[in-house]
Image (cartoon, grey):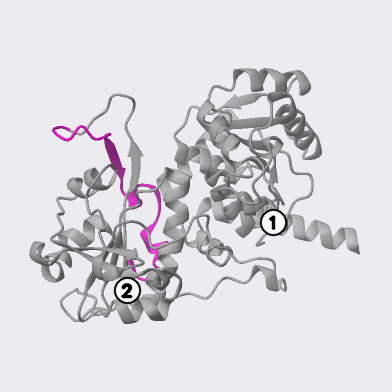
């Protein structure tokens, strides 16, 4: 009976993972399993005053900390903050940073490019959590009525709100981000710093009748992601085009079952790991339950990584391995191929977005405990009840911890 129950749960997990990759809405778990119940949805009504404007107000921010993993982590927190204030969330584009030598004309600031949310994900799925709209749609629509240039203030959390300096558009990516949206600000408004974690205080400080649009200097969210916010990942659903591309990649270049590997082995990551070595918590290390960050967890050597990948491949009867990394993986591929003769090892030549989708769709996955990109994959696989492992970790935390 136990073996039958375990088998049913395994089948259910695989079906849930397939549903997640296909983007079939909010995932429902196995019947009768209370741990798989969806989080409560927010206010879903498309509230307007008849002119297409939300009288409860709008919330904007610049996703100006880190790259894709950090930006998506902040989005989950911003979703909860907008829901708590009952404001429509204006979803910003993702920021990509230009290569070496790329500069903004006249300013000399490092260049950026913007990837609209809807180029990657379905805004309709996010709106099932709470009212939301892409930033471009807001600027073309409601902003013309409720956010004239003369009323555009930059908000920021401050220990001294009366004398707050929000640094508005100073530096990169802040200046280039708002410049690409043709937005300037006329004043700064400070918000008590405790309001970031106190919705009642935030609502009292930011009444919609006084401030119909609140544009924050950065995301009104914490990093790493709060445990209570992780399940909001289920409302971040990849677009049909992105899902189709991932399915085509798997069909043409991989053989199931396959192991997905996220390997952080770049020199900049090595330097970051030296900073975090010995700390009880560093970046996204909460996700793997480590009591202390060590080099073996944050930056394991190639032999250690290859051995763990080979063990996972053997345990999952893998027929191929997919590797996504921030650096050249030639030595890692060689080491894996030595341990797994006859099993193809495919190195990613895709974008970071495709990498995340492919790692999420893997039959087995191993990633980096500290990485925010691994964290996206881990949260998505937790929702689908699919297993995840980490380099340097032998005892895994349960999903939803």
Identify which residue is drawn at 50% across, 40% down.
Answer: 246
The crowd level at tag 2 (other Cα within 10 Å; few <14, some 14-19, many 20+) is many
* Disc sitting over residue 171 in the figure: none
Would you say 29 lies left or right of 151 here? Answer: right
Q: Give the vertical position of 142 relative to 316 (above or below).
A: below
> Where is residue 254 drawn, in percent x and y?
61, 31
**Quadrant where the N terminus is found in the figure:** bottom right
> Where is residue 273 drawn, in percent x and y?
59, 36
* Disc sitting over residue 87 in the figure: 2
Q: Nearer the viewer, residue 86 or 273?
A: 273
> Where is residue 16 drawn, in percent x and y?
63, 57
Q: Nearer the viewer, mark 1 or mark 2?
A: 2
Q: Is residue 199 magenta?
A: no
Q: Give SS at disc 2.
A: loop
Q: Are marks 1 and 2 in contact (CB under 8 Å)?
A: no
Q: Residue 293, located in which quarter of the rendered image?
A: top right
Q: How many marks?
A: 2
Which residue ends up furthest to the right in the rendered image?
1
Q: Which residue is mark 1?
A: 13
Q: Nearer the viewer, residue 309 or 174?
A: 174
Q: Residue 337, located in which quarter of the rendered image?
A: top right
Report the span colored magenta.
105-132
**Quadrant where the C terminus is found in the figure:** bottom right
Q: Nearer the viewer, residue 43 or 57?
A: 57
Q: Could you tell which of marks 1 and 2 lies nearer the N-terminus?
A: 1
Would you say 190 lies left or right of 361 here? Answer: left
Q: CA distance from mark 1 to mark 2?
A: 35 Å
Q: Give SS at disc 1.
A: helix
């Amino acid at each position: 009976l136990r073996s039958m129950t375990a088998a049913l749960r395994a089948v259910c997990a695989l079906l849930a993972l397939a549903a997640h990759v296909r983007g079939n809405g909010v995932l429902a778990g196995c019947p009768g399993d209370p741990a798989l119940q969806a989080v409560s949805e927010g206010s879903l009504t498309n509230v307007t005053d008849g002119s297409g404007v939300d009288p409860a107000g709008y919330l904007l921010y610049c996703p100006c900390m880190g790259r894709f993993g950090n930006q998506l982590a902040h989005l989950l927190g911003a979703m909860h903050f907008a829901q708590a204030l009952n404001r429509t969330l204006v979803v910003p584009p993702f920021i990509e940073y230009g290569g070496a030598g790329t500069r903004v004309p006249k300013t000399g600031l490092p260049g950026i490019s913007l990837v609209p949310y809807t180029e990657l994900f379905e805004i309709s799925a996010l709106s099932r959590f709470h009212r939301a709209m892409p930033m471009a749609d807001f600027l073309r629509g409601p902003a013309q009525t409720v956010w004239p240039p003369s009323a555009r203030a930059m908000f920021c959390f401050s220990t001294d709100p009366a004398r707050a300096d929000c640094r508005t558009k100073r530096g990169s990516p802040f200046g280039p981000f708002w410049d690409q949206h043709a937005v300037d600000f006329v004043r700064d408004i400070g918000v008590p710093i405790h309001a970031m974690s106190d919705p009642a205080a935030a609502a009292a400080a930011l009444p919609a009748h006084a401030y119909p649009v609140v544009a924050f200097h950065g995301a009104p969210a914490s990093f790493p992601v709060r445990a209570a916010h992780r399940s909001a990942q289920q409302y971040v659903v990849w677009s049909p085009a992105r899902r189709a591309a991932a399915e085509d990649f798997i069909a043409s270049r991989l053989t199931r079952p396959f192991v997905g590997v996220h390997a952080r082995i770049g020199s900049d990551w090595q330097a970051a790991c030296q900073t975090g070595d010995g700390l009880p918590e560093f970046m996204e290390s909460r996700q793997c339950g480590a009591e202390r960050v060590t080099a073996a967890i944050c930056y394991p050597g190639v032999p250690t990584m290859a051995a763990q990948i080979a063990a996972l491949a053997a345990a999952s009867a893998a027929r191929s391995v997919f590797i996504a990394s921030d650096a050249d993986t030639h030595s890692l591929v060689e080491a894996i191929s030595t341990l797994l003769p006859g099993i193809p090892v495919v190195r990613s030549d895709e974008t970071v977005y495709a990498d995340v989708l492919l790692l999420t769709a893997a039959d087995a996955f191993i990633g980096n405990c500290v990485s925010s990109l691994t964290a996206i994959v881990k949260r998505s696989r937790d929702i689908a009840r699919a297993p995840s492992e980490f380099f340097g970790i032998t005892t895994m935390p349960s999903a939803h911890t």
